[in-house]
Image: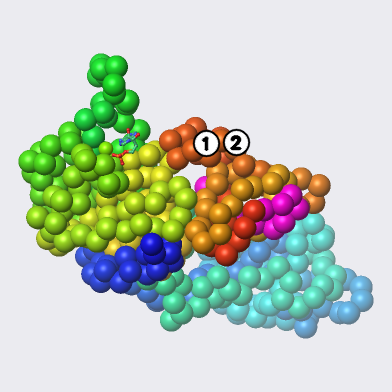
């Protein structure tokens, strides 16, 4: 038996090369992983500019009490610049975003300004009010985004605010998926009485895509040595990572281990966890291999725990593990010491705190528990039964 954490460390140690960088247009960069640090070539905004509509003037020019009349010598809609220098007694009409004219340091908002012909009457406000300073968003020369960052809409926008229309990201890892088992039938085709429809390949497909990978679907392989061997070899030629489900327990038809020993290398682990004990980890040529258990909850969970961090590392991501939170258990939970248990939970905020309960029956074949839940309840190795009111760790889906 090995612990979840030891397993994760051993797996991450095997992933030493990342997918290569590639240049993509920013319009296709969402969800991709930035390959290198991104440094700002200039300040954003590039100049002090107005935070509102009004009149720009010099605060030193305005008396501390009472009003002062200024001559409006410039009209500055957004995008316009003032080439001259404002003199004492002068102001410029200015709109949001327009650069502050030289000689001015404050914008007197439209609502506070009295307009009389080509003049305005203004009273005192704080120096610098309604001025957005140059570089307040991004400073020239600073690292705005670190390599390994996954790009969300806001990161993409920040990149384009620097004038860039292309960005260097890591190629999406290719992940070949296959299901094993004579009993597994393809959805949409008839099934014999002894068969069940494939769910693993589809939860895994979604999981891979959610993690920024690209799926190569290799279908269902029956429990026949030659078929499995041929399909796994094909998979290893097409992908960076090969993930199968089923066939890793110790049944007579659990062939993954034997075949992997012939065509690659494999370690066969019993992980101290529930659900999802058996796990096969290895390689076929340069491709990483993961043999996940067949039970639907176990295969999805072992993906989350072992494949996802490896996929993230391969993809160059900096953060490999999700954040965990604390919540108060509102029901008793059975827990065996010495292994890490993962229950599907419903997390909700009630009466001022985060509460969590299980989704009900926790069998590793009950995929609907993943649907009913919105988090995993993570019960650590050294923990025993949980009483209501105790604090537990949760990992939101
Ligand atoms: P195995 O590890 O191959 O012994 O499979 C364990 C359990 O998972 C069995 O009940 C299988 O029928 C089930 N199973 C295996 N593969 C899949 C799959 N792709 N989709 C749904 N259930 C599966
Ligand atoms: Mg099987």
Secondary element type, mark 1: helix
Q: Can residue 33 be seen here?
A: no
Quick check: is the Cβ at mark 2 less than 8 Å away from ligand 1?
no
Of badges 1 and 2, the one in the foreground is 2
Q: Residue furthest right?
A: 65
Image x and y of residue 165, in percent: 33, 59
Left or right of 178 on screen, residue 122: right
In percent of width and height, residue 292 lies at 31, 48
Q: Residues within 10 Å of mark 1 (few under 14, many from 20)?
A: many
| Quadrant hosting ligand 1 | top left
Residue plotted at (9% across, 55% down) = 262
Q: Is residue 259 visible?
A: yes
Q: Residue at x 27, y 55 (%)?
A: 280
* Res. 129 mark: none
Question: Residue 62 versus residue 271: which sits nearer the camera?
Answer: 271
Q: Which mark is residue 369?
A: 1
How far apart marks 1 and 2 lie (CA) works out to 7 Å
Q: Considering the image in quadrants, where does the N terminus appear?
A: bottom left
Render colour scheme: rainbow
**Residue 120: % across, % down:** 78, 64
- Kind of element beneath mark 2: loop
Q: Residue at x 35, y 57 (%)?
A: 270
Identify residue for label 2.
360
171 or 197, nearer to the observer: 197
CB atoms of marks 1 and 2 within 8 Å = yes
User: Magenta region: which residues?
Assistant: 386-397
The image quarter in which residue 64 lies: bottom right
Nearest the eye: 356 or 257: 257
Determine which quarter of the picture holds residue 220. Answer: top left
């Amino acid at each position: 038996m090995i612990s979840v954490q030891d397993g994760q460390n051993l797996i991450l140690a095997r992933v030493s090369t990342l997918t290569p960088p590639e240049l993509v247009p920013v319009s296709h960069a969402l969800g991709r992983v930035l390959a290198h640090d991104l440094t700002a070539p200039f300040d954003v905004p590039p100049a002090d500019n107005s935070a509102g509509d009004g009149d720009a003037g010099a605060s030193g020019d305005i008396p501390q009490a009472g009003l002062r009349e200024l001559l409006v010598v410039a009209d500055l809609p957004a995008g316009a610049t003032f080439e001259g220098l404002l003199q004492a007694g002068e102001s410029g009409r200015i709109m949001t975003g327009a650069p502050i004219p030289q000689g001015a340091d404050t914008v007197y908002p439209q609502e506070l300004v009295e307009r009389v012909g080509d003049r305005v009457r203004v009273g005192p406000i704080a120096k610098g009010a309604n001025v957005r300073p140059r570089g307040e968003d991004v400073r020239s020369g600073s690292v705005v985004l670190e390599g390994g960052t996954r790009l969300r809409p806001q990161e993409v926008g920040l990149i384009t605010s620097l004038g860039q229309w292309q960005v260097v990201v890591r190629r999406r890892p290719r992940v070949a998926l296959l299901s094993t088992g004579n009993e597994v039938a393809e959805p949409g085709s008839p099934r014999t009485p002894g068969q069940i429809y494939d769910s693993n390949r589809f939860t895994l497909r979604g999981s891979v895509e959610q993690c920024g990978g690209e799926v190569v679907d290799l279908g269902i392989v029956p429990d026949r040595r030659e078929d499995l061997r041929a399909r796994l070899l094909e998979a290893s030629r097409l992908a960076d990572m090969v993930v199968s489900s089923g066939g890793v327990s110790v049944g007579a038809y659990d062939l993954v281990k034997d075949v992997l020993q012939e065509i690659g290398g494999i370690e066969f682990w019993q992980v101290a966890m529930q659900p999802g004990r058996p796990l096969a980890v290895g390689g076929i040529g340069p491709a990483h291999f993961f043999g996940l258990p067949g039970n639907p909850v176990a295969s999805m969970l072992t993906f989350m725990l072992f494949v996802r961090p490896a996929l993230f590392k391969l993809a160059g991501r900096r953060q490999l593990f999700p954040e965990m939170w604390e919540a108060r258990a509102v029901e008793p939970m059975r827990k065996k010491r010495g292994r890490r248990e993962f229950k599907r939970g419903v997390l909700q905020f009630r009466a001022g705190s985060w509460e969590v309960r299980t989704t009900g029956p926790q069998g590793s074949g009950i995929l609907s528990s993943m649907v009913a839940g919105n988090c995993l309840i993570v019960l650590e190795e050294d923990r025993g039964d949980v009483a209501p009111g105790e604090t537990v760790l949760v990992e939101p889906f």
